[in-house]
Image (cartoon, coloured by chain):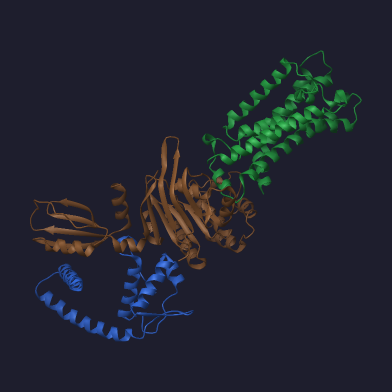
Chain colours: A blue, B green, C brown
């Protein structure tokens, strides 16, 4: 299980770990029903705080991504199977969009910036909508 | 284990003090007041050696760091020592106790050596007399030892040594200058007025010395307990 | 929520004319890995010495395991349950590694010989080597071994990675993390290596000039603080009066950088409402948090 964290990036480590787990599920490295490594193993392998690992696992359970079975550990939720299908569809959508951007003559860096910007806009609109 | 640590800290100093003793004995037997018998000169010289040894063994002495030293000369390991789950009283008591035992060992060792090496000086004394002398000398020197140990709790290496030396030398000079009677003169009780010559135990001197030693030790404990490190 | 394992309130300590601690407050949760950060001379070592009982505070209250640090007999009890690595890592120069282990063992009835052996091998400490012949880093590891082997519930470490090369640093951090994971040992360590603290600490406290200027769970602080960069179409002539929470504002030409400690969404809204503004938000690293707070103190 290869997770990679960047402690100085500013992003809270528990969020980074959650991201890594979700990414592993999306790429198929972790499948529904698979057991996640123990808290102790993750803490020792990544040399990170075990309480942070606990927090990440708990948040993942809260989001329904993971199930914590008392005594036996953390397991990838069965319900992610459905999510994985949606992600696969999303990949197809993005692939098509990227081809069109390439036709427009955008470089890869430009593509990424445009994409990041639009996601940021979307996030802002969502939170503004929530505040109303 | 504190005794073991103390031993590792003081063993070379003890060796030095013993070696130093040989020098003292030589001095005492070959110099001094010619009006005195060789035996008297020796004992007189030895009485100085007893408190000099006590001063050296009570504190920083020559090289190694003491358990409690003034801020300037503090060795970093004192923080480790003080972080152990041991009261400061116990730390001081162990260190002071060891030094006093070493002082007694020096007295016993020197007396035994002289007894064996200079049979001519025995002057009709029995082994029991020599043992009695060792006991009396040890008790009478305890005040000097305590004073030196007290100074070691707040003075630097050299200051502690010379400070003790000068203080005791001065007290001895005072005792002679004010002609303190032999029955109360703690210094003389170790030397010319010792049981070897008087054949009576100097109870008053022993009492004074032990009393002073106790008070000085109590003061040392207070210093160590209140000090900041 | 259990009681904090270390608690300090309003600690004051002065040496001659200099004030070392000026009303320090501290709360260390049990089972946490707590990073105590500050510049040189900020008061880290003074605080640690107070907790161990080497010093007494002039004013204020400090407790470890709920016991008062300033009381002599309570302090002996505290020290029997704490593992301590000193600032200068000095041990007895006339002892070897195995001698000092044997010496220290005698003071702790709950000594764990299995841990002693484990860490002796893990830290690669040669038993017969004299302590002055050990590097500072190795002495640090040795002191850590002594603390772990006596089964300490709390480790108080003063710059434990000082003198260690990067590989050894990672090793020590891993062992600290493993200790926390296995036995729930609380680890309180002072450092000015921010990356290390960021890597393993779940709580931090920044001390400057004898007082705590920022403290709390590290992840929460990172969520709470955000850096916002607002780029305007043309330079502003009238300064903007930012809403509450925009703590540090720096303007350079057409760019304004804001360190927001709260109310991030409101500040974002305000920024976007300004004519010709494009806004970006960035996460804040511990280094930035540290520098921002210490510089403006």
Give the side of residue B111 with respect to residue C38, left or right.
right
Looking at the picture, does residue C154 appear above or below residue B105? below
Task: Estimate the x, y position of residue B108 in percent, counting from the top left.
Answer: 79, 34
**Residue for point 65% across, 34% down:** B149
Residue at the image position 49 percent from the left and 59 percent from the top:
C5
Viewer can see residue B218? yes
Q: Quadrant of residue C221?
A: bottom left
Residue occupying the far top of the picture: B35
Pick the quarter of the image with the N terminus of chain A: bottom left
User: Quadrant of the rendered structure where residue B215 is?
Assistant: top right
Q: Quadrant of residue A85?
A: bottom left
Q: How many marks?
A: 0
User: Measured from the top left, where is residue A72 in percent x and y?
Assistant: 47, 80
User: Is C284 on the left-hand or right-hand side of C34?
Assistant: left
Residue B140 visible, this angle: no
Quick check: B14 above or below C266? above
Q: Is residue C295 left or right of residue C100?
A: left
Q: Position of residue A116 (x, y in %)?
A: 19, 69
Q: Residue B160: x percent and y percent?
A: 60, 30
| Residue in view at x 78 percent, y 27 percent | B205
Q: Quadrant of the C terminus of chain A?
A: bottom left
Residue displayed at 44% across by 47% down:
C11
Q: Residue furthest toward the right? A: B124
Question: Observer-nearest residue: C246 or B2?
Answer: C246
């Amino acid at each position: 299980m290869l997770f990679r964290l960047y402690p100085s990036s500013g992003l809270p480590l528990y969020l980074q770990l959650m991201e890594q787990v979700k990414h592993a599920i999306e790429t198929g490295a972790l499948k529904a029903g698979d057991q996640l490594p123990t808290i102790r193993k993750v803490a020792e392998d990544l040399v990170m705080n075990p309480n942070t690992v606990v927090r990440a696992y708990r948040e993942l359970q809260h989001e329904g991504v993971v199930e914590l079975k008392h005594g036996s550990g953390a397991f990838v939720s069965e319900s992610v199977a459905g999510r994985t299908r949606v992600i696969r569809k999303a990949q197809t959508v993005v692939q098509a969009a990227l081809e069109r951007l390439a036709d427009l003559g955008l470089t890869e860096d430009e593509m990424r910036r445009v994409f990041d910007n639009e996601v940021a806009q979307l996030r802002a609109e969502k939170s503004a909508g929530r505040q109303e | 284990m504190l005794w073991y640590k103390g031993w590792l800290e003081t063993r070379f100093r003890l060796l030095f003090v013993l070696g130093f003793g040989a020098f003292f004995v030589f001095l005492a037997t070959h110099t001094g007041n010619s009006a005195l018998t060789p035996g008297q000169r020796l004992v007189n010289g030895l009485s100085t050696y007893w408190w000099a040894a006590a001063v050296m063994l009570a504190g920083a002495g020559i090289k190694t760091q003491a358990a409690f030293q003034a801020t300037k000369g503090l060795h970093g390991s004192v923080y480790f020592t003080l972080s152990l789950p041991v009261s400061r009283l116990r730390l001081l008591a162990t260190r002071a106790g060891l030094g006093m035992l070493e002082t007694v060992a020096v007295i016993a060792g020197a007396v035994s050596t002289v007894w064996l090496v200079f049979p001519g000086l025995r002057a009709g004394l029995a082994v029991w007399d020599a043992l009695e002398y060792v006991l009396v000398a040890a008790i009478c020197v305890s005040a000097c030892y305590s004073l030196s140990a007290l100074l070691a709790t707040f003075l630097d290496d050299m200051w502690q040594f010379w400070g003790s030396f000068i203080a005791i030398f001065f007290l001895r000079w005072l005792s002679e200058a004010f002609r303190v009677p032999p029955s109360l003169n703690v210094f003389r009780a170790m030397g010319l007025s010792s049981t070897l010559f008087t054949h009576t135990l100097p109870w008053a001197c022993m009492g004074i010395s032990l009393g002073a030693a106790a008070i000085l030790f109590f003061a040392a404990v207070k210093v160590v307990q209140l000090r900041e490190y | 929520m259990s009681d904090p394992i270390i608690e300090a309130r309003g600690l004051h300590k002065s040496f001659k004319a200099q004030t070392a601690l000026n009303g320090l407050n501290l709360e260390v949760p049990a089972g946490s890995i707590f990073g105590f950060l500050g510049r040189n001379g900020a008061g880290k070592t003074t605080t640690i010495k107070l907790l161990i009982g080497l010093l007494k505070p002039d004013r204020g209250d400090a407790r470890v395991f709920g016991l008062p640090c300033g009381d002599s007999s309570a302090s002996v009890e505290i020290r029997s349950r704490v593992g301590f690595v000193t600032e200068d890592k000095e041990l007895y120069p006339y002892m070897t590694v195995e001698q000092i282990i044997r010496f220290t063992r005698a003071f702790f009835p709950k000594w764990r010989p299995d841990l002693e052996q484990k860490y002796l091998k893990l830290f690669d400490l040669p038993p017969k080597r004299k302590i002055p012949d050990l590097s500072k880093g190795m002495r640090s590891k040795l002191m850590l071994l002594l603390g772990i082997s006596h089964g300490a519930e709390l480790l108080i470490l003063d710059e434990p990675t000082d003198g260690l090369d990067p590989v050894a640093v990672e090793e020590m951090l891993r062992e600290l993390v493993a200790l926390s994971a296995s036995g729930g040992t609380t680890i309180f360590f002072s450092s000015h290596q921010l990356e290390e603290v960021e890597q393993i600490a779940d709580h931090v406290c920044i001390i400057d000039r004898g007082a705590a200027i920022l403290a709390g769970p590290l992840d929460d602080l990172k969520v709470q603080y955000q850096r916002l960069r607002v780029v305007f179409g043309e330079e502003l002539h009238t300064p903007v009066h930012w809403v509450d929470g925009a703590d540090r504002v720096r303007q350079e030409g057409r760019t304004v950088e804001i360190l927001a400690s709260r109310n991030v969404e409101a500040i974002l809204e305000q920024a976007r409402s300004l004519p010709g503004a494009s806004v970006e938000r960035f996460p804040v690293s511990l280094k930035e948090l540290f520098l921002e707070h210490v510089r403006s103190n």
